């Protein structure tokens, strides 16, 4: 994308300012615009945190160190990585570039993906927010932790199995993409160059698609009628899937979703747990971020796998604990 | 280039306070830090890009096109241009903030049956909640009555049928969210936890007792300050208020209420 196109877009937007402002001020467009901007603005600090950590890993952490720090047996590496996710007290936007960099630095993709899924679901900030949103119901916090860990580990292990059996479907294309990137980086200069080049690359690839994800989420929030949701409220297992889908559509920050889940009182606790388990792992915004970081073919496999596993984990944990 | 632009508008909304229309107030400092980092990263990248462009130009004028280093440089420049391809989409929110920043959530989600679930419920218990887990409130102080949030009004109205509100003169700030009802109007305000995408609307029916129609003509989405007294909780869990005074005001910098956690 040459610079002049970017410039031309900006200039034409400024020239057509009045007409554009007229369209943008109709109530439905203004509402859409606010939700869209809210999703983008909210993601910016977390995305910056993610790409700074990612750049630092690329620049100063030796390539072999992380690979050695993670257990070599996948069956151990996946749970260890999932539990390590608790150490990153941030929303999901930060964990995407970091997980991608972990793969780049030689961590088994299955383990990095377990980290990616677990971190926003089970970190202390999110668990405290959940406890506040569900006063007097500590079982919900425990259930969220358990369902988050379970889903992350299962997706990681399934991915490892796919990876070993059929690299073309699972890890093959992913590894190839990253190998190309690494070759480009190693040709460059010192750690500072690597840091800035990596951070900017991750920011633009994730950030550009974040815009697509935020636009899709804002559109569905604006046009899908609430009555569609209410019709699932009494429908047993259907309601569990319905709230899982709602989490995908709303694309909320994992620090806030517990409050929204708590307000969905017409739904069963297990359905609320599905909302809390799916939301941090896969939603429209996250799928877009993941497509930017790992590629579209990756998301085509990973997103459905994650959704089904998260809903199933919530259903099982809900049966046991709630 | 896109990084630099994103950094500039991020710093701008943090400084101007416009960010409060989109995310919770506590995010301000973090947006500032993120914006400054983005500006720095953008400057470094732009500088590096121009340096490699000019170096490439120099190599070319030396007639040294087949030099391996020049190939590398050209690849670098090419790759940079190519790499921007998804990133340029960030121009959309940047342009939106520069051209016509939205004023914050309007009444659209209050009145429309939308997937923003939550549209017309309150986290303190509306929407089919059972009564045993509703919070109970201490008596209202005079200072609180002068700055009551719609969120707290709804919570207090649900608590023992509004016992803590009875007879107290209240002051509320919100926007006009609906057509006139029984000679009054619907007052609303959103509460947000993280960003405007997780907003919950609280509503109050405002009526004028003396004349039944003395409320000044108000357009939808107009911000108003309402003084009045709580009457009752309607069947749909919306509190009802009789107004003594309704004043149109400019929208506050922070259009949202912050739930106390």
Image (cartoon, grey):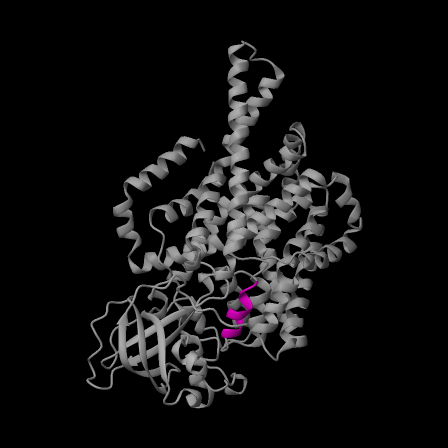
Position of residue B121 relative to residue A28, above or below, is: below
Name the quadrant containing residue B74: top right
Position of residue A54 relative to residue A92, above or below, is: above
Q: Residue at x 53, y 70 (%)?
A: A259
Q: Farthest residue to the top: give it.
A: B63
Residue A288 visible, this orientation: no
Position of residue B207 relative to residue A211, above or below, is: below
Q: Residue B76, percent across and down?
A: 56, 27
Q: Residue at x 22, y 80 (%)?
A: B183
Horizontal placement of B242 versus B114: left or right?
left
Q: Residue B54, percent across and down?
A: 51, 20
Q: Residue at x 52, y 63 (%)?
A: A247
Front position in the image: B137 or B180: B137
B54 in the magenta segment: no
Q: Residue B240, percent across and down?
A: 34, 83
Position of residue A92 relative to residue A134, above or below, is: above
Residue A188 visible, this orientation: yes
Main SS class of the magenta portion in the image: helix
Front position in the image: B115 or B248: B248
Q: Quadrant of the C terminus of chain B?
A: bottom right
Horizontal placement of B217 versus B135: left or right?
left
* Segment tinted magenta in the rendering: A255-263
A262 in the magenta segment: yes
């Amino acid at each position: 994308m040459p610079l002049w196109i970017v410039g031309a877009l900006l200039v034409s937007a400024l020239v057509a300012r009045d007409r554009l402002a007229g369209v943008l001020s109709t109530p439905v467009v203004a509402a859409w615009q606010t939700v869209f901007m809210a999703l983008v603005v909210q993601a910016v600090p977390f995305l910056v945190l993610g790409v700074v950590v990612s750049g630092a890993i690329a620049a100063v952490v030796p390539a072999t160190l992380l690979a050695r720090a993670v257990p070599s047996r996948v069956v151990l590496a996946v749970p260890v990585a999932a539990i390590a996710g608790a150490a990153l007290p941030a929303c999901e936007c930060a964990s995407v570039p970091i997980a991608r960099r972990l793969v780049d630095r030689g961590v088994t993709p299955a383990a990095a993906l377990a980290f990616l899924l677990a971190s926003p679901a089970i970190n202390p900030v999110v668990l405290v927010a959940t406890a506040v949103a569900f006063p007097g119901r500590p079982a919900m916090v425990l259930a969220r932790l358990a369902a988050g860990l379970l889903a992350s580990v299962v997706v990681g292990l399934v991915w490892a199995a796919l990876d070993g059996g059929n690299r073309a479907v699972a890890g093959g294309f992913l590894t190839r993409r990253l190998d190309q990137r690494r070759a480009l980086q190693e040709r460059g200069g010192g750690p500072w160059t690597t840091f800035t080049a990596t951070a900017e690359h991750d920011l633009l690839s994730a950030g550009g698609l974040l815009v697509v994800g935020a636009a899709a989420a804002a559109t569905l929030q604006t046009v899908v009628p609430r009555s569609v949701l209410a019709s699932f409220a009494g429908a047993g297992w259907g309601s569990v899937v319905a709230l899982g889908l709602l989490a995908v559509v709303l694309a909320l920050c994992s620090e806030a979703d517990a409050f929204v889940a708590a307000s969905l009182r017409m739904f069963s606790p297990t359905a609320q747990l599905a909302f809390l388990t799916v939301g941090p792992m896969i939603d429209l915004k996250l799928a877009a971020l993941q497509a930017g970081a790992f590629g579209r073919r990756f998301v085509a496999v990973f997103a459905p796998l994650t959704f089904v596993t998260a809903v199933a984990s919530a259903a099982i944990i809900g049966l046991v604990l709630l | 280039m896109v990084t630099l632009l994103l950094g500039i508008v991020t710093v701008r909304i943090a400084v101007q306070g416009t960010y409060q229309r989109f995310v919770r107030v506590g995010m301000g400092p973090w947006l500032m830090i993120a914006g400054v980092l983005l500006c720095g990263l953008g400057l470094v990248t732009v500088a590096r890009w121009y340096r490699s462009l000019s170096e490439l130009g120099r190599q070319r004028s030396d007639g040294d096109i087949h030099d391996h280093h020049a190939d590398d440089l050209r690849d670098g420049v090419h790759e940079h241009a190519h790499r921007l391809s998804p990133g340029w989409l960030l121009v959309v929110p940047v342009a939106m903030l520069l051209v016509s920043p939205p004023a914050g959530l309007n009444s659209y989600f209050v009145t429309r049956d939308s997937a923003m679930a939550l549209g017309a419920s309150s986290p303190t218990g509306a929407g089919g909640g059972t009564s045993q887990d509703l919070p109970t409130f201490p008596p209202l102080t005079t200072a609180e009555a002068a700055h009551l949030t719609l969120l707290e009004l709804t919570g207090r109205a649900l608590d023992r049928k509004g016992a803590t509100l009875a007879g107290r003169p209240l002051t509320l700030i919100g926007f006009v969210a609906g057509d006139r009802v029984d000679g009054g109007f619907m007052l609303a305000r959103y509460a947000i936890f993280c960003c405007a995408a997780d907003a919950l609307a609280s509503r109050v029916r405002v009526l004028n007792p003396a004349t039944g129609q003395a409320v000044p003509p108000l357009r939808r989405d107009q911000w108003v300050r309402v003084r009045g007294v709580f009457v009752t909780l309607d069947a749909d869990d919306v509190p009802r208020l009789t107004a003594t005074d309704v004043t149109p005001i400019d929208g506050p910098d922070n259009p949202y209420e912050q739930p106390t956690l």
